[in-house]
Image: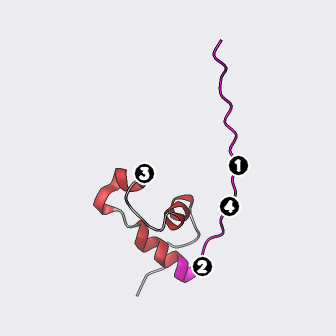
Amino acid sequence: MFRDVSLRRWTPSARDCYFRGCVCSGCPIFEIIGNQCRMKRTVLNLVRKFGKPERRNLSLVIEEESEE
């Protein structure tokens, strides 16, 4: 049984993990935390509590400085 005391919402990191399919290989969080990462378990509990997250289309505009 999971404890949902701290599960209040989908965080950006949990959302990223979900859309990566909870695959740790290449994940920036896993590279920092390593085997201590519990994001997959958190994602599974968030899906049980809130359902699947909505995919948000974020369009980021990055302006490159012109080299003069």
Q: How far is the residue under mark 1 from the one under mark 4?
A: 9 Å
Q: Residue at x 44, y 67 (%)?
A: 22
Q: How far is the residue under mark 3 from the one under mark 4?
A: 20 Å
Residue 67 x %, y %: 63, 16
* Between discs 1 and 3, the one toward the N terminus: 3
Residue that label 3 marks? 28
From the viewer's side, name the closer residue of 16 and 48.
16
Name which residue type carries label 1: Ser
Q: Is residue 16 left or right of residue 37?
A: right
Residue 29 falls in image quadrant? bottom left
* Between discs 4 and 2, the one toward the N terminus: 2
Label number found at residue 50: 2
From the viewer's side, name the closer residue of 40 and 57.
57
Q: How far is the residue under mark 3 from the one under mark 2?
A: 25 Å
Tag 3, which secondary structure?
Answer: helix
- Is there any visible trace of residue 52 in the rendered image? yes
Name which residue type carries label 4: Arg
Q: Within 10 angstroms of label 1, few (less than 14), some, or many (20 or more) residues?
A: few
Q: How far is the residue under mark 1 from the one under mark 2?
A: 25 Å
Residue 15 x %, y %: 55, 64
Q: Main secondary structure of the magenta part?
A: loop
Q: How far is the residue under mark 1 from the one under mark 3?
A: 21 Å
Q: Residue at x 37, y 56 (%)?
A: 30
Residues at circles 3 and 4 in contact by the CB criterion of under 8 Å: no
Residue that label 1 marks? 59
Q: Is residue 64 left or right of residue 2?
A: right
Q: Which stretch is magenta?
A: 47-68
Q: Within 10 angstroms of label 3, few (less than 14), some, or many (20 or more) residues?
A: few
If the image is split into quadrants, where does the N terminus sit? bottom left
Q: Residue at x 48, y 68 (%)?
A: 21
Q: Is residue 5 left or right of residue 37?
A: right
* Between discs 3 and 2, the one toward the N terminus: 3
